[in-house]
Image: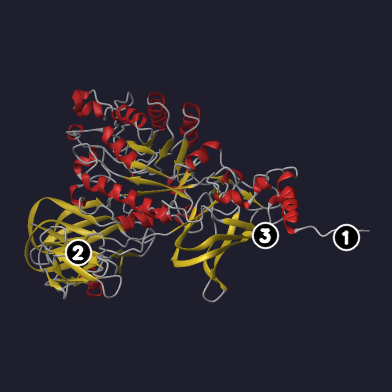
Amino acid sequence: MKNYLYPSFVIVFITMLSFSCSKKPAEPLPFGAVPTEHQVTWQQMEYYMFIHFGPNTFTDVEWGNGKEDPKIFQPTNLDCRQWAATAKEAGMKGIIITAKHHDGFCLWPSNYSTHTIRESGWKEGKGDILKELSEACKEYGLKFGVYLSPWDRNHVSYGTPEYNQIFANTLTEVLSNYGDIFEQWFDGANGENEEGKKQIYDWDLFNNIVYTKQPQAIIFSDVGPGCRWIGNEKGYAGETNWSTLNTAGFEPGLKAPSSDILNTGNINGEFWVPGEADVSIRPGWFYSPSTDDKVKTVDELMNIYYASVGHNCNLLLNVPPDRTGRIHKNDSIRLMEFRDARNKVFGTNLAADAKIAASNTRGNHDAYSPNNLVDNNYNSYWATDDNVLSATLEIDLGEAKIFNCLSLQEYIPLGQRIADFSVEYYNEKTNIWDKLVSGTTIGYKRILRFPTISTSRLKININKSLACPTLSCIELFKAPEELFAPIIRRNKEGYVSLLSHIKDMNIYYTTDGTTPERTSKKYIEPIFLPGKGIIKAITVNDMTNDQSEVASEVYDIAPIKWQITPTSAEGVIDGIKTSFVDIDKKESIIINLGEVLNLKGFTYSPLNDIQAPNVFRYNFYISDDGKSWYKLKNNSTFDNIKNNPIDQRVLFDKTIKTSYIKFEPIEITSDSKTYTIAEIGVISE
Ligand code: FUL
């Protein structure tokens, strides 16, 4: 027999032929619960706008009680096209509006309520915001969705069996008259009416109406069925985030799975119920003039983006229109800055021309080639043979590239499979593969950040997959190094410190409300600010001229003269919101203000943690001598503090004179023997 020695190009050619000409192996079988086509389309929207608008916009509360005079709803310059144009420009794909919040007020002239936009008299009772907004969304190529709260603090039937049918009729009305709805947002809140009556919601009835009227709509609730709440109102999904969830025995609201489970989903969960992170661009959900200075910074929004979209979760960002009926300029400017920041990071995929080799490719066939990972097409993917549950992808970038961000995407129509992965890079100085980063789930999208490196080669090890892994996309990015805004802190003695995250950076500040620049005052030592005032500050890298965003804090009177009882609660008046005190539930706190003050209200800072035993219901008293007390607030509530534990501002009906204040807890957000306070402050005249 003759021995043939094939030249190497012939071998390569034969290998290529065998790679591409053999019969295409069948697609991997779907694994576990898989998304519907509509859920895949929904997931690909990634980012869209929430709008909270209604009587609360005009009353400065988070939960209206339903007794507000509808006439207070008077936007002077409402423009739904401005909302839609803003969302479009911001890169959002749709808008979901609070058609009816807990106060029961309907933003359309509903036939099933007497507490609606019709009764407000706005546009002579002929207005219909759902009509205006659905049309604006169509014009701007955005999808339209509606939030409806079954909890209704206005409707007379709430708390009776008839109410479920009334809510069903209301829902039918909304889903019949405003075109296609991409998402039906059901708030699980199940509060009481005035007589303390609660409603047992008929979720099957409600869901069936959506299935009939808008079959493509994704139903949001704590347990889906279309998508689920992510377990907090901060916009953060778990690093481990399964789109699958066990829902048997659970219901939206009080009977929902724990917030920890909602945050991560269930591995091998029975149903496909992907996460949606809802968060407001301001501290509260509704507009308040007091938060014009509190619009989240680009850094905060970027962190939210990485923790939502980057954690296999859609981002529903609330942008509440103001009292004119328009999105305030502070919010819209921030949205555009946020868009620019995302474009800066994700604009150039440094892996676009990479060559990728896989340790295993399904049937050795081109159809599942690792090249699919960089072909810019989500629907083509790399997969392994059925019995191969771990694999390595080696990425050759051709030349050394500098990057600090990696995005991976699984092909979710076949289910979520990958449970553990790690990334290594080739250290060209030591000629060793070094560990870079690791993770658990990937899902539709997982974005990882790490310290900036330079390399031409990268390895992705899929260490554990529930079934043969699939991956659609690999992308690499170089995010600009961030220069964070300074931290502003005032102590009990009234001295304000400005702290930089990085050593040797200079800080410049103003105290007159103007935007600080490099020519402003340079921070050298703590600034004495015992009374009211505003501090704005920036961090500057004097070498590069780069500057951070502006940090700002508005202060009232510093607690210099204050004394607190019990003395163990001193942390409540130390000026530091990150420190907190746990106090026995039966014990009130009393503050001796050390002088007579004219007060317009007070502030309560809870611990910003959804599990913390913060105060929900309270009494508030004042006194001249610390002995005889006058009750100023009776059985009052900090609405929505359980889900959104942010600073609370309580205004009194009129300015009062007092030397002592007393805060008495009545109901705590969790089942605990103690309650938590981070700070108590005053709003002085
Ligand atoms: C919660 C509500 O209670 C809040 O007011 C807000 O609407 C938020 C999005 O959902 O359950």
Say if 250 sits above or below 578 in the image. above
Left/right of residue 314 with respect to residue 627 in the rendered view: right
Label 1, label 3: how many angstroms apart (C-alpha)? 31 Å
The amino acid sitting under disc 3 is Ser
Quarter placement of the N terminus = bottom right
Left/right of residue 607 with respect to residue 172 in the rendered view: left
Residue located at (42% from left, 59% from top): 478
Inspect this view and state whether residue 270 appears.
Answer: yes
The amino acid sitting under disc 2 is Ala
Left/right of residue 40 with respect to residue 495 in the rendered view: right
Report the disc number at residue 3: 1
Q: Quadrant of residue 271?
A: top right
User: Mark 2 sits on what residue?
Assistant: 537
Residue 324 image offset from top left, x and y in percent: 18, 37
Find out if the beta carbon at label 3 lies less than 8 Å from the nearest ligand 1 atom.
Answer: no
Say if 249 sits above or below 98 in the image. below
Residue located at (19% from left, 64% from top): 537
Residue 581 image offset from top left, x and y in percent: 29, 69
Q: Mark 2, mark 1: which one is toward the viewer? A: 1
Say if 177 sits above or below 6 in the image. above
User: Mark 3 sits on what residue?
Assistant: 359
The amino acid sitting under disc 1 is Asn
Q: Who is closer to the viewer here, 315 or 651?
A: 315
Binning the other alpha carbons within 10 Å of mark 2 as few (below 14), some (14 to 19) or many (20 upward) gives many
Q: Are marks 1 and 3 in contact (CB under 8 Å)?
A: no
Q: Who is closer to the viewer here, 343 or 38?
A: 343
Q: Who is closer to the viewer here, 481 or 348?
A: 348
Q: Who is closer to the viewer here, 572 or 255?
A: 572
